[in-house]
Amino acid sequence: MPRKRLVRSRAPETETTNDVLGFIADGLYGEPENENPFPFFGIVSDGHQQVCDAWNKYREKILTDWIVANPCTRPSLWWQFDAPRPKNHEDHETARQHRESQAHFLKRHGQLLSSERRYLGKHPELLNDNKETTNE
């Protein structure tokens, strides 16, 4: 007997893009209408995977726009998914104790773009530690 194939209707991507971008880009494109467009994020692993997939899909756009608006910093999901990890326990503890600024961390790990290096030349105060934390 032939099986009926289940076809799931999928909402057009444009309906969720603003909520998704608002959530994964820390409000760069405005706050999402829904507080969390990933209702299972933090509850089940599938929710984490949805956020990871969305970040992977929109990463380049978000980072390009983020760096223009917030040079020498990165959005929170960059810290979660893309930031260089400490090579050892001592490196991690040193970073935590000094609470280095995002700019300092990004510079130390070679993550600044040339435009950010120029910006940092005009704003060396961003290298001061204890201003903002990295990914604690």
Image: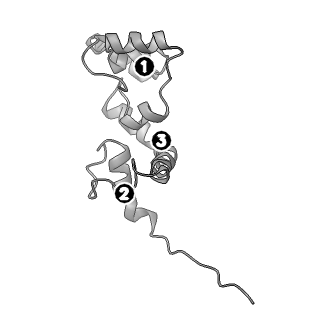
Of the residues under marks 2 and 3, which one precedes in the sequence? 2
Kindly state the secondary structure of the residue where label 1 is placed.
helix
Of the residues under marks 2 and 1, which one precedes in the sequence? 2
Which residue is painted at 48% across and 16% down in the image? 109
Nearer mark to the viewer, of 2 and 1: 2
> How far across and how far down the image is residue 92, in percent?
44, 15
Q: To which residue does mark 2 refer?
A: 39
**Residue 77 appears in the figure:** yes
Q: Is residue 71 left or right of residue 130?
A: right
Query: What amino acid does circle 2 point to?
Result: Pro
Which residue is painted at 65% across and 85% down in the image? 4
Q: Is residue 61 left or right of residue 68?
A: right
Q: Nearer the viewer, residue 34 or 49?
A: 49
- Classify 27 as above or below 39: above
> How far across and how far down the image is residue 106, in percent?
42, 19
Q: Which of the numbered marks, if any, corresponds to residue 106? A: 1
- Classify 119 as above or below 35: above
Location of residue 101 (image quadrant) = top left
Location of residue 73 (image quadrant) = top left
Which residue is painted at 41% across and 37% down in the image? 77
Q: To which residue does mark 3 refer?
A: 59
